[in-house]
Image (tube, rainbow, N blue to C red):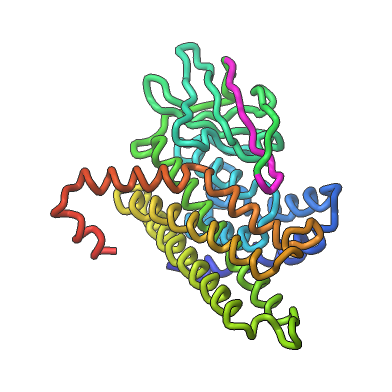
Amino acid sequence: MTNDSDHIVTESAARIFADLADPQTINRLDNGAWKAPFWQALCDAGLPLAWVPERLGGAGATLDEGFAVLGVAGRFALAVPLAETLLAGWLLTRAGVPAPNGTMTIAPSRPFDRIILDEDGTLSGSAIGIPFASEAQHIAVLAHGRTIVVALVAASDCTIGEGQTLAGDPSNIVCFQRVKPLRYARAPFGLDHTALMLMGSVSRSVQTAGALESILSLTVSYANERVAFERPIGKFQAVQHNLARLAGETAAALAVSGSAASTIGQSDNIDESGFFEGASAKIRCVEAATEGAAIAHQVFGAIGFTKEHILHRFTLRILAWRDDFGSESYWAAELGRHVAQQGADEFWPMVASR
């Protein structure tokens, strides 16, 4: 559910993105000079630490407000760690650990990776596919020892390998070789590996839905402008059919991601409803990303694959986001296992209550 505060935060984020992160302008720049002023503007507005309360150095925004910011970020599909910093701030906040200024990322970001807190208070282990680890100043870590803890680590203290996503964004292997955290605290009840993966999955789903909105807008505009056989290609039935399919995928992604964000936003912990909504959102948004990217490129033809065109900045990122915090197949298996454990008598009431 949105309110006036949500709209104010969304409008503030949209203004910053529109003024400093125009997709066409950035697509022509190769030196990344736009990143510093853009990130500073985000920090001045308190957006990277929106989920951190004021007493811990953040903006004190609600979860709903933070998800609204991620929706805007998705519509611009920028190569900056805004979502990662938001998630890191959320994780640290849950354990009462103050969040530092600057860029952050979060570890682990894959369901089967585990970081271990040793008896001497150092961290060991490795995690793959950590987004923007090579550009982050700090890493927020969910670690397992005698209990689950949340730790803040300086990225420079870790061994970070090279790697990138389909979109060319950093995606790194991070090795923790007896790394001493700057500080850490015990995770509260309900904050475990599954909760972290679900929170990350919903964040990626919201971003994906936002990106699909932009893809739909670009594709419809192009179909109405591109002329073939003396009429816009959008007048051809086959193209109209594809545009309708793309609109359907976008609407589905917006609906399911919005429902998951709202459910989590209304609860202090990610409970059974949050699990059901979050897993469903990731599954459906991955499907929408796969179908939506294919449809858009089919409508655009060869021009959509060129470096000079902005379409790829959206399609490649939504395809890259599919594996973050659990793939479609992982969450489908987890959701099926969860439903089976509830028993046959609970299946229909669970579905009908949504």
Q: Residue furthest toward the front?
A: 229
x and y percent of residue 165 in the render?
A: 65, 43
Is residue 122 positioned above or below 39 on the image?
above
Q: At which x and y percent is residue 229? A: 74, 84
Q: Is residue 276 left or right of residue 29?
A: left
Instruction: Depth check: give the residue in front, 131 or 224.
Output: 224
Res. 330 in view? yes
User: In terms of depth relative to the viewer, which is nearer, 204 or 99?
Assistant: 204
Q: What is the total number of numbered labels drawn onto the structure image? A: 0
One can see residue 62 in this view: no
Q: Residue at x 37, y 19 (%)?
A: 146
User: Which residue reaches farthest top?
Assistant: 120
276 falls in the magenta region: no
Q: Which residue is at a point 74% across and 55% down the rendered structure image? A: 41
Residue 167 is a magenta residue:
yes
Percent of width and height locating residue 232: 71, 84
Residue range in magenta is: 166-177
Residue at 55% across, 40% down: 88
Instruction: State the quadrant of the C terminus.
Output: bottom left
In depth, the one of 54 and 10 nearer the eye is 10
Q: Is residue 199 left or right of residue 270?
A: right
Location of residue 69 with respect to 144 vertically, above or below:
below
Q: Is residue 111 left or right of residue 271?
A: right
Q: Is residue 30 above or below residue 130?
A: below
Query: In the image, is 115 to the left or to the right of 309?
Result: left
Q: Quadrant of the N terminus?
A: bottom left
Is 3 in front, or is 229? 229
In the rendered image, which quarter is residue 156 located in? top right
Measured along the vertical axis of the image, is residue 220 above or below residue 259? below
Q: In the rendering, at what x and y percent does residue 155 appear?
A: 66, 29
